[in-house]
Image (cartoon, helix red, strand yellow):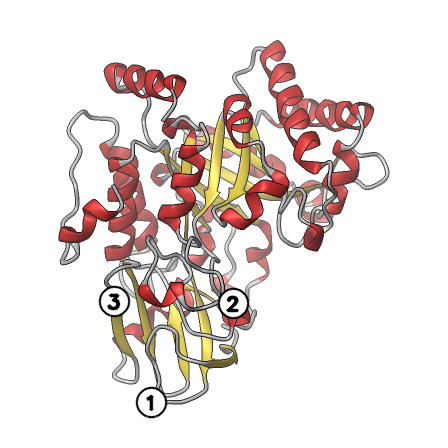
Amino acid sequence: MNCVAKILVVLCVAAWGCHGRFVCHYTTWSRFRPDEAAFQIDDIPGKLCSHVVYNFLGVNESTHQLDLLQPDYDIDERGLERFAALKEKYPQLKLLVAVGGWGHGGAKFSEMAKFRERRNQFIGSVVKFLHHYRFDGIELVWLYPGNFDRGGAVEDKDTFLYLVTEMAKIFRQEKKQWEVIVQVPLDVSRMAAGYHQEELCREADFVHMIGYDMRGWWNNFADVHSPLAARPHDLTVQSFEKVNVGDGVEDWLGNGCAPQKLVLGVALFGRSYLLDDPLDNTIGAVTIGAGDPGPYTNEPGYLGYCEFCQNLTSDEWTKKWDDVGRCPYAYTETTWIGYEDQRSLEEKINYVKRNNLGGLYAFSLDMDDYRGECGEPFPLTRILSQYHDETKVKDWHIFTSTTENNQSNLS
């Protein structure tokens, strides 16, 4: 940790003013689910979150300004206006807008950030948006600068930093305390091409680290997708030795980031697989494709907790625990899924506390058991919300578990 980071830690701890953030994500497309399963703005549990993010707006490829991806909902159905009105119901709540996302790609960002004039056009449109809707900041979800497989270009590494630096300067001039947040990977293989890590951490208000989707059906072997540490099989399967939460966070810390600026992302969904052999169901088992889509998310290999939590009490499913990765998984004769539960989220909360990180974010609210089909509504969100509540007081509670003896490996 460099000197600046150390000073920030001391100041934050001394003042106890750096409350741990718990940032919740709202996805506009979840409203399309059938009947009672439709997730609406009114379903957002504002008391459980410090911030809520509206996903997604985009970058217009012609004007290089902020672009409404769903104007029929954002404007005609007053989606943005109704989201902004959450502040009336929850005065303490901060509201953010996410720009980009996986489906948006990186090419539009790359073209916009390439020239100062275009960056100015984009930043100006963001300022206008924040004034109009009274939001508290923007999360730049450029996945991923400098990566050719995502529409990136060689100069993205520099122009991304220029964009963040110039936006932060303009925000300061507006004197609105708006936040510039960047969402970044924990896969260290993407760092060199797209991120001036120390400089980005200095200019951005917060850095949201994607602590999930590190594995999936596309790898052709079963695994949890958000392991905290490297497991023995990671050393032998392709290049996964450093592709885990612990090594990814250490990379950002080791490259000059103050821990209080780093926010760890956790998933409220699981990644599922079809097993090749019903008798081979361990981590690393050979798979033959994505698991069946769920009734709400409707995407192969991807299940919200709300879509499979009932399965976990069925005799058909066998539940197991990854002692090193500190995540649960479950399987039948044909299907395998890695996911998060109360125990694994408590492990991640402990990790955030021990490393003095700035908080947690969860993707996304509509993936949790929001209708309470398996018990109390929003069970995973409530666990994470406890962390935010605890950081308002001086004495933290460290959750204990059967893997507590291994904690020192990640501290």
Of the image marks 2 and 3, the number of the one nearer the N terminus: 2
Q: Amino acid at mark 1?
A: Leu
Q: Image quadrant of residue 319?
A: bottom left
Marks 1/3: CA–CA distance? 18 Å
- Badge 1 marks a residue whose secondary structure is loop
Quarter placement of the N terminus:
top left
Task: Identify which amino acid the numbered label 2 is placed on.
Answer: Tyr
Q: Nearer the viewer, residue 310 or 21?
A: 21
- At 44% from the left and 58% from the top, the residue drawn is 367
Tag 3 residue: 321
Q: Is residue 72 left or right of residue 323?
A: right
Q: Nearer the viewer, residue 22 or 288?
A: 288
Numbered disc 3: secondary structure: strand
Residue 191 percent across, percent down from the top left: 55, 42
Q: Please identify the quadrant where the C terminus is shown.
A: top left
Q: Which residue is mark 1?
A: 279
Residue under numbered circle 2: 296
Q: Which callout, 1 or 2, points to the residue nearer the camera?
A: 1
Image position, residue 255 (x, y; %) = 46, 32
Identify the amino acid type marked 3. Answer: Trp
> Within 10 Å of the Cα at label 2, are there few (<14), some (14-19), or many (20+) other Cα atoms?
some
Q: Which mark is residue 262?
A: none
Is residue 88 in view? yes
**Under tag 2, what secondary structure?**
loop
Q: Residues within 10 Å of mark 1 (few under 14, many from 20)?
A: few
